[in-house]
Each structure stands twice: as structure tokens, then as C-alpha cells.
Amino acid sequence: MATFEMDANLKYQLSFLDHPWSLFVFGGGYYRTTWVTDNSFGYQNMYGPQLGTEVLYLLKSGDALGAIFKYGATFPSGIAISFVNREESLAGEWVHLVPNWGRFTASLAVSTVSLEFSNVLLMSSFATTLSLSRDW
């Protein structure tokens, strides 16, 4: 199975935690789709808004360790908007700042996706994901 995922978020740092801690809230949207031989399982064109929070602890090296929680309402193609359809994710992350290049992140996440239509459970899944990303 192959998966394509894309997130676009705006993040805001809350100022009530002292150094070396940082707390962020974010909101935006996401898109997910999978490719499977014979379409025997997976999902296609799932998208929607998402909200989340991120806590970071700055290490003396300048790197950071953190945790992220995300909640996203899913709007898969052909299914009406409903917060029963959702993706929830919890991740641990390591963040490395590279001067003039930005923030590079390695994360390990566990997530669940649940889709219902007319009170019938269409899909429920659990996934573990290792990802590498770069923020600008």
C-alpha cells in the first residue's frame, strides 16, 4: 500500500510556558489518499479541517523533543460532513534546526481513522507512521 499525505496549518505559540518549554496550537487542513492493488482496502481522497497542539522541549544542543496531538474531521468523497468521521493522531518528534534551511522533523505517530455513513461503520483503521518533514 502506498499513501500520500499533505497538511497545511497555521501555528501560533502560546506564551505562558517558560524556556525551555514551548506550547503551540495549530489549525488548517489535510488531504490523504492510498493506492492499493485491486483497491481491496484503504481509502481515497479523504480531506478536512484539523486542529492540534504541540509541546516542545528545547535541548541544550538546539534540537528539540516534542509531542503532537491532532484531531481532524474527515470529509471523504461522497460522504456528508460529520465529526463522527474523524482522524486522531498522537506523535512523538525530534526537531533539528538547520541555519538558513529551516526546521527538519522526524516523528513517530499512531493514528486512528473512523468513517461512518447512515450509522454504519464503513472503515476503522489504526496506523503507525514514521515520517520526515521540513517546515519553512
Image (cartoon, rainbow, N blue to C red):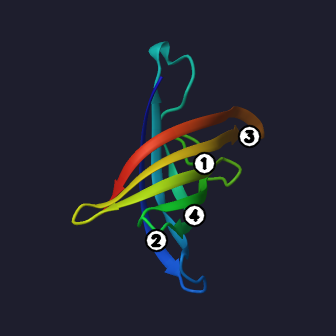
**Closer mark to the observer between disc 2 and disc 4:** 2
**Closer mark to the observer between disc 2 and disc 1:** 2
The quarter holding residue 5 reads top left
At mark 3, the secondary structure is loop
Query: Would you call the spot at circle 3 few (<14 residues within 10 Å), some (14-19), or many (20 or more)?
Result: few
Residue 25, x across and y down, in percent: 55, 71
Residue 113, x across and y down, in percent: 64, 41
Distance, label 1 to label 4, CA atoms, is 20 Å
At mark 4, the secondary structure is strand
Distance, label 2 to label 1, CA atoms, is 28 Å
Say what amino acid the circle numbered 4 marks.
Answer: Leu
Q: Which residue is mark 1?
A: 80
Say what amino acid the circle numbered 3 marks.
Answer: Ser
2 or 1: tag closer to the N-terminus: 2
3 or 4: tag closer to the N-terminus: 4
- Vertically, is 108 above or below 33? below
Q: Is residue 90 left or right of residue 45?
A: right
What residue appears at the point 43 percent right and 69 percent down from the top-left corner?
Answer: 10
Say what amino acid the circle numbered 2 marks.
Answer: Lys
Query: Would you call the spot at circle 1 few (<14 residues within 10 Å), some (14-19), or many (20 or more)?
Result: few
Q: Which residue is mark 3?
A: 118
Residue 6, x across and y down, in percent: 41, 48
